[in-house]
Amino acid sequence: MVALRKRSRILDRLLDDRGRVKRWPVRRAQQLIVLDHIAAQIEEGVTWNEVELGHMLDGLHAFNDPARIRRELVDLGILARKRDGSAYWKVAPAEG
């Protein structure tokens, strides 16, 4: 319960009135909360090319760095991509 309140306070500070991330947080724990928030808004079962994914991510943040978000989501295993970067998709969460 405390963790949910803390998460909510962090997102209240970092999201604009449209629900977009206003700025990239410095602290890693806050970055992970932001990335989880963004990941929750990404549809499963859709494949994007890099440009399409960038446009979609642009709608979720206001600090103009979709490449940072894309790299972070791939590094965390939330998104997967073809080796050449020509296609990206959301990885289904592990059950259990």
Image: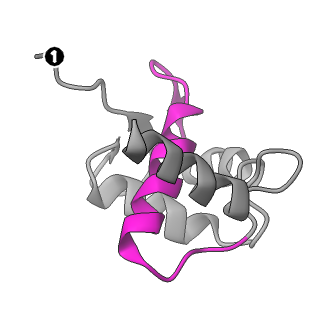
Quadrant of the frame with the C terminus = top left
Q: Is residue 32 left or right of residue 61?
A: left
| Labels in figure, total | 1
Picture layout, residue 40 above or below residue 67: above
Name the residue: 78% across, 48% down: 59
Quadrant of the frame with the N terminus = top left
- Give the residue at the far front of this rendering: 2
Q: Is residue 73 left or right of residue 6?
A: left
Picture layout, residue 15 above or below residue 37: below
The image quarter containing residue 95 is top left
Q: Is residue 20 left or right of residue 1?
A: right
Residue 22, given in percent of the width and then of the height, sits at: 75, 66
Name the residue: 40% across, 33% down: 90
User: What colouring method underlies this structural image?
Assistant: one colour
Q: Is residue 19 magenta?
A: no
Identify residue for label 1.
95
- Give the residue at the far left of this rendering: 96
Q: Is residue 33 magenta?
A: yes
Query: Which of the two residues, 58 or 95, is positioned nearer the viewer here?
Result: 95
Picture layout, residue 75 above or below residue 95: below
Name the residue: 74% across, 72% down: 64
Can residue 21 be seen here? The reply is no
The amino acid pointed to by label 1 is Glu
- Give the residue at the far right of this rendering: 17
Residue 32, given in percent of the width and then of the height, sits at: 40, 59
Residue 51, given in percent of the width and then of the height, sits at: 65, 53
The residues colored magenta run: 23-49
Query: Which of the two residues, 47 or 2, is positioned nearer the viewer here?
Result: 2
> Element type at marker 1?
loop
